[in-house]
Every structure is written in C-alpha cells, then in structure tokens.
Amino acid sequence: MAGHSKWATTKHKKAALDAKRGKLFANLIKKIEVAARMGGGDPGGNPTLYDAIQKAKKNSVPNDNIDRAVKRGSGEGADAVAYDEITYEAYGAAGVAILIQVLTDNRNRSASDVKVAITRNGGTVADMGSVARVFDRKGVVEVKKTQPAADKKAADRVVTEDDLLEATLDAEPEDIVDEGDVFKIVCDPTNLVAVRKAVQDAGLDYESADLEFRPQFEQAVDSKEAAEKLFKLLDAIEDVDDVEAVYSNEDVPDEILESLDA
C-alpha cells in the first residue's frame, strides 16, 4: 500500500477540498467588497453587488460575513479595504492561452506569486496583450437544468434551451451553452443585468451572473503528457491566494480526459 492508508488518502482529499472552499469563500468576499467600493453598498441600486451577494449565498457564505464585506467595501469602519484587479497572461503546454484575473491588496506579492506558479510549472509568462486578444469579455448567467418546484409535492421543473431562449429573447442573448447540469446564457456585458432579470421574471432561479472571458477559438491538446502538464499548471495558478479566476482555451479530447481520470 506504499505506506498510505485509505483514511490518510481521504483526509488528504478532504483537506484539499476544504482549502479550495476556503479560497472560494475569500474570493467571493473580495468580489462583494470590490462591488460595494465601486457602486455603493445598496444591492438594490448596485446590480454588480446584488449578483456578488447572491453568488456568495449560493455557496453558503454566512450572512454575517456578507454584511461585513459590504461595510468594508463601502468604507465603513476601521477595517475598510481596497483591492486592485490585475490581469496576467501566460502560455501553457501545446500553446494554450491562459488569462489570469487577480484581486489583491498587494500588487508586488501577487505578481511574484503568479509568476512563480507559472514558471515552476512549465508555463511561460506572456507579453501583455498577446493572450488577452484571444478572449472576449462576456456576460454569463448560469441556470441549472433542474429547478425545484415551488410546491414540495410537485415534480421538479426541467428547463430546456427553448425555455431560456423564450424567456431572455428581449434581453438579446448571444448564445445558450449546454454544459451538462447547467445552461450558460452568454450575452454582451452591457446586457448581463437584463438577461439575469429576464431569467428571474420567468420564475427561474439562477446560479450566478458574472462577467467572464471566453476564448474566440480553442487550442488542441492532443497528447496525455501535454494535458497533464497543462492541468498541473492551471491547478498551480488557481492555488495562488490572490487569483480570482483563470481562463484558458484548451481543447482536450474526451479519450485523453478519460485516461487522466483513470
């Protein structure tokens, strides 16, 4: 057994999941603080803050933490904070383009940590703008395919692509992407709030409404070795404390993904 017990493996996996969850909480709190700083602490008049709070609630962030984050971002109290949003660019195995978004209160620390993660894990720091041009900034509203019925005795509602298209047509969605258990409604960034409201007006719950970077094209990764290197690099970048989001344009064939899972 190479000195590893089943419990040790389970404990290690749980620690990794807890660490990821802790980082997710921290990032969600930062997004609330930034939204409050940019648009004020009233979610009713600040759609970005409204969506940041809803996403935090969906991920079980306690209400007290959310309230404190709004106050800090609004400049209330002695622990008011200010974060800078910075974008870094890199290339991974097989020439995959990687765009890294950071929220930080210490630019020097973040720059060092991100560059170390890239260079120590087989990536290359890219010139500014060389990767960004591969991505377009879009609004994305995520909706689960299965929605709980208002009446607990009734069957859950199954949402179709046609349902979402009909609900959001006037808000001008650009695409509806099927991603397994969820649909992602892609739109122009200026239409994000309109699309989200259209989903709500149709009586549907949404998981998140965010601005994301989506690649204009995908880069083929046609070997298991290259895929392993790429995912190792992406994991290392995501593990950096100040990293908020990582976007990449890899296209890995299903058979390679299955072999990695195995």
Image (cartoon, rainbow, N blue to C red):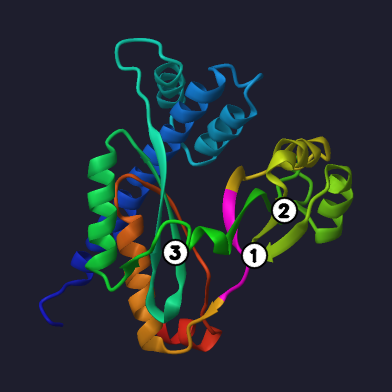
Q: Residue at x 23, y 51 (%)?
A: 112
- Drawn side of residue 183 relative to residue 227, left or right: right
Depth check, front residue: 68 or 87? 87
Location of the C terminus (image quadrant):
bottom left
Q: Identify the magenta region.
A: 212-218
Q: Name the residue under label 3.
A: 98
* Residue 120 appearing in the image: yes
Residue contact between numbered discs 1 and 3, judged by CB atoms under 8 Å? no
Gap between marks 2 and 1, in whole Å? 11 Å
Quadrant position of residue 176: bottom right
Q: Is residue 179 found inside the magenta-colored segment of the image?
A: no
The earlier-in-sequence mark between 1 and 3 is 3
Tell me the kind of residue under disc 3.
Ile
Secondary structure under tag 1 reads: strand
* Residue appearing at x 43%, y 21% in the figure: 73
> Few, some or many C-alpha atoms within 10 Å of disc 2 (few <14, some 14-19, many ≥20)?
many
**Circle 2 residue:** 185
Image depth: mark 3 or mark 2 in front: 3
- Measured in 3D between alpha carbons, the distance from the residue under mark 3 to the one under mark 2, in whole angstroms, is 22 Å
Of residues 5 and 146, the one nearer the viewer is 146
Residue carrying label 1: 179
Disc 3 crowd, CA 10 A, few/some/many (<14, 14-19, 20+): many
Q: Where's residue 127, x and y in %?
A: 39, 61
Type of amino acid under label 2 = Ile
